[in-house]
Amino acid sequence: MSAILAEHYTSMRSPLPVIVIGNGPSGICLSYLLSGYTPYIKEEVTHPNPILQRKLEDFSNVPITQQDLEYLSEGLEGRSSSPLALLFDTLLRPDTDFLGDVDSVLKWTLEPERAIPHLVLGKGPPGGAWNAIEGSMITLSRGDWMGLPDLSFKDWMRTKKRNLRNDRSTAGDILNYYQYYVKNKRLEKNFLSGAVITSVKKISKDEENTLGHEIIWNNAGLEEKQNQDKNIFQVSGFIKNDNGPDQNFSLYAENVVLATGTYDSPSWLGIQGEDRPFVSHEISALEEAVRSKKVHQNSDPVLIIGAGLTAADAILLARHYNIPVIHAFRRRVNDQGLIFNQLPQVMYPEYHKVHQMMKEQSVFQGGPYRGYMSLPEHQAVCFSDDKKCTFRDKHSQHKAFNVSMVLILIGSNPNLSFLPKNGTDLALDAEQPVNSKRNPLDIDPFTYECVQEKGLYAVGPLAGDYFVRFVQGGALAVASTLLKSQKRPP
């Protein structure tokens, strides 16, 4: 670890300006914007939004990151509630929601003098949660919406001689694209993989005075540094080492950006037996069981609990290998809140096939979907040692089923255990756990700085932005804020 960190601290005698926790699309995009890549407006392209076009023409020679983003985003409408998510998306993909084919109005210039030193920490390789998704899974979003600035995903696919499926891509292609992006844009020096964060805290002036000195990493090892007036964050954790003991570290930064996503902590039902070995909360457990032949077409059914897209993906995976499935969920099949009712059938035929199965198949044998049984309006009660699951239906009657394994796929929550109070004091409702949909972090919508903690920023699902095309607006907000606070060398 010391050798890796030394590269970042060889000539540094002060804390890093920025540490980013999380190396998924949000962290990658932010690293790009902090590395001196500067967006300007193309003169030869006209934006289809005439009001926005006039605003852009007023300051055509000024980088977007140096402009008034609140003014530019005013009046924009779209599929996100974040004004800056809409702004950056419409600059990168004008008119895309109407299937328009207008090129991006942004041109990118590398201006090293604008770069801000930073470090992106990730538990795994660049790509974040995409490293944990089975590669053959098809993305929910259109493939071209998964792209990052200045490198079209569709163009990258052409270089690989690959085609999109129904305008969508596989998770494997998306991950390869993100990792290629980091290399192609020469961002690798900013990324440190295998880093598990255990604590993020701000060191106050009183604490600094008590400590007397700060300790930082540099190329010689440890060094003491005199106090500065400005408060800083201490980021502590360890580097995972497969060939030896993990090594602890403490880094220091003037600003910290939370870009961890929400997939670290799967939701639990909270019932008896949920911690048994045959019960899992991740779809990867099914993939491993298929590879090891622990489940097969002659085994007891795999029980899948949940009515979202991850549960649907698990059903499709099991069906692909002819593995029998029992599918249980609490809602009615015609509940308008089900995600399947919100997806265009032409674009998402496989998910509508699952929804059709949920509607038509309520018995295990016979029918058009042999080997699949739907249990709508059923709640799991307990799991027993002999791999038996007991359910309660809408009439409060109990049923029991023998299964080979259980997948509980009912969503996930962010893991912010490295923050005081698990980050709840930073959320919109400080009395409830952080949840990307119901209780995201309370941020300024135009800087993405946490309202309750200056110098701490949140992007992506933590800030209420879910899709890759929209999480990049948060990266723009943070980069613009930090760049405006920097004094540019003459």
Image (spheres, grey):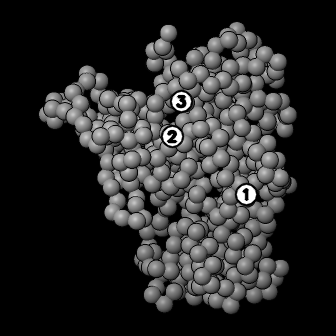
Left or right: where 112 falls relative to 53: left
Disc 3 residue crowd, few under 14, some 14–19, many 20+, Cα 10 Å? many
Is residue 239 at all visible to an observer of this figure? yes
Q: Secondary structure at mark 1?
A: loop
Q: Secondary structure at mark 2?
A: helix
Q: CA distance from mark 1 to mark 3?
A: 29 Å
The total number of labels drawn is 3
Work out whether residue 432 or residue 483 is closer to the camera in this orientation and state it. 483
| Residue tagged 1 | 170
In the image, residue 54 above or below residue 471: above
- Identify the residue shown where x is 50% and y is 76%: 279
> Quadrant of residue 200 in the image?
top left
| Residue tagged 3 | 34
Residue 185 marker: none
- Identify the residue shown where x is 72% and y is 24%: 107
Q: Label 2 amino acid?
A: Lys
